[in-house]
Each structure stands twice: as C-alpha cells, then as structure tokens.
Amino acid sequence: MRTAIEVSGLRKVFGDKVVLDGIDLDVEAGTIFSLLGPNGAGKTTTVNVLTTLMRADGGTVRVAGHDVATEARAVRSAIGVTGQFAAVDELLSGRENLQLMVDLARVPAVEGRRVVADLLDRFELSESAGKLASSYSGGMRRKLDLAMTLVGNPRIIFLDEPTTGLDPRSRRTMWSIIRDLVADGVTIFLTTQYLEEADQLADRIAVLDQGRLVAQGTAGELKRQIPGTHVRLRFATVAHLDAAARLFTDATRDTEAMTLRVPSDGATASLRALLDRLDEYSLDAEEFSVHTPDLDDVFLALTGRSTEVTAK
C-alpha cells in the first residue's frame, strides 16, 4: 500500500508547554485513519501542522509525498479540509457556494457547471440548490461543506469532527458519504468525539493524550489490549457446566443462565485452544461468543478520562 501521510517525531511547543511530543504516524492511501483524544490532547494542533496551517518545531511530516515545511503549496493542492463548523456562506445558495469554490479553483466554465451539478446530485442537494444556505439544516450544511471541499478533487481529506451536532440519521448519511469517498480511493484523516464513529469507519485508530500517542491499531486490536475480553459459553446441562467450570478455574459462573465466562484475549490461537480443551473432555457448548470491551472502555483505560471530553 502507498503511504498518504508520514509523520515522524512531530513536536510542537507553545511557550513552555509541549503540545506534541514526538508523534509518529503512517496513514495508508485509500483508508480512514481516526485520531482520538481528550481536550488538550493535541488533535487540532496535529491537523493544523499536517494541513500547513501551523509549522512544527521538530520532526518531519510528508503529506501526499510532499514535505509540509518546504512544499506547502504542493501539499495544499493535494488535500481538502472540512472543519468542525460548516464553512458555508449563508448569504449564498447551495449552488452559489459550490460555484464560488469552482471559480476559486479556476475550473473552466463548462467543466465547472458539470462539477457543481455532479456534487449537488451526489450529496442529495439538488432540490435545495437554489435556497440560501442559511435555510439549510445542520446535516445539509455539513454535506454542502464537504461537497465544497471536493471541488478540487483532493486525494486526502481532513475531517475535523464532521458529524458534531448532527442527528443520528444525518450522521449515518455522512458515514455513507465518507465510505463512498474511500471506495473511490480517497484517504480520510478523521478526528471525532464519537467513539462509535471511529469504530464504524476507521481502518486504523490512534489515541492521543497529553501530546503523546498512547495506542495505535485497528479497533479490534485496541479493544484486545484492555482487560475484560472473555468467551461466553452456555451449556445445556448443569453437569456440563460443572465439568467446564472445573476445567477453567479462572472462569466466572452463572448457574441460572447456565453460562461460563472464560477470560481470553480473543485471539484465534486462544479460541482454538479453548475449543480443543472442551472437545478433549467431550463437552459441547450450546452457544459460544466472544465479548470484548468497546472503544469507550479503551479510551477510559488509556487516558483516564471519559469520552465526553474529546470534542477538541
């Protein structure tokens, strides 16, 4: 896989406060990478450096193959940025907002009209294209904002909490749009305050806390790092439950539910060993399921803070 974003030893200092303390990141092209962290963790600063809005004090950053410090113009031509708050002009209609971006990008007139029409259709804004953006709902504004970002056909898009304040239906619509972008080969760098969003969308997740990365991996890998993963076995008879409880002495038993909760890391090798042991003693479980902590558990364990403070 090609690398879309490479970050090595990134440092940023404001006065005597170290905001980013040696960050290393690699984002593969055509994937969704999510950066999580509580208030003050350094997420916004990271995005600002990666999008050339702020200079780093140490380390190297390459975006779309270009150094952000020495090739800022090339970086800007390759990326799109959608901030937490929709940057639409409320005095213009949806179509006029898009046309403004087309004009700024110096797209030829005929091609520009096609781009505007295609984006309005893609984001289901055609019927409201002539209405002022001030009349749009929050979800419509977010869609228009993202559509405006796509005018230049960027291959890397930075989304800073793109669904903040949206209702569940609008949020899922945005998720669908983001997945479609990635299916077209676009790389998404996502910051979000919704751990469900990262869980649903991200190919890889990094957790940033007090300027340092405390964990990286897929959602599944991060969940397996946290104690609490277990295999739940349900048996048909008390005799089988008793026998299994004697086999797995560290398990938690629920006689009423006829279940045994066996601690496990959830890995394939561990599950195979557990099943082999049951088979060795001719024990059959009626139900078998693996339960892992969710990302809220991971976030709390890694940062010591709840997910309610991840908005910035």
Image (tube, rainbow, N blue to C red):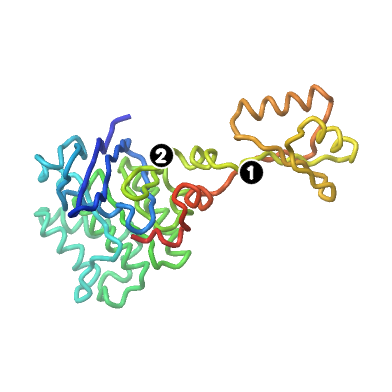
Marks 2/1 in contact by CB < 8 Å: the verdict is no
Please tell me in which quadrant of the rendered image residue 170 appears. bottom left
Distance Cα–Cα, label 2 vs label 1: 21 Å
* SS label for mark 1: strand
Q: Is residue 20 left or right of residue 164?
A: left
Name the residue furthest top. Answer: 280
* Up-down relation of residue 240 to residue 148 (above or below): above
Nearer to me, 307 or 95 = 307
Check residue 291 in the rendering and tell me which mark sits there, or answer none: 1
Location of residue 166 with respect to 5 vertically, above or below: below
Element type at mark 2: strand
Amino acid at circle 2:
Gln
Q: Residue at x 38, y 43 (%)?
A: 206
Q: Position of residue 153 (x, y in %)?
A: 22, 48
Q: Check disc 2: other Cα within 10 Å, few if <14, some if 14-19, many if 20+.
A: some
What amino acid is found at the position of numbered circle 1 in the picture? His
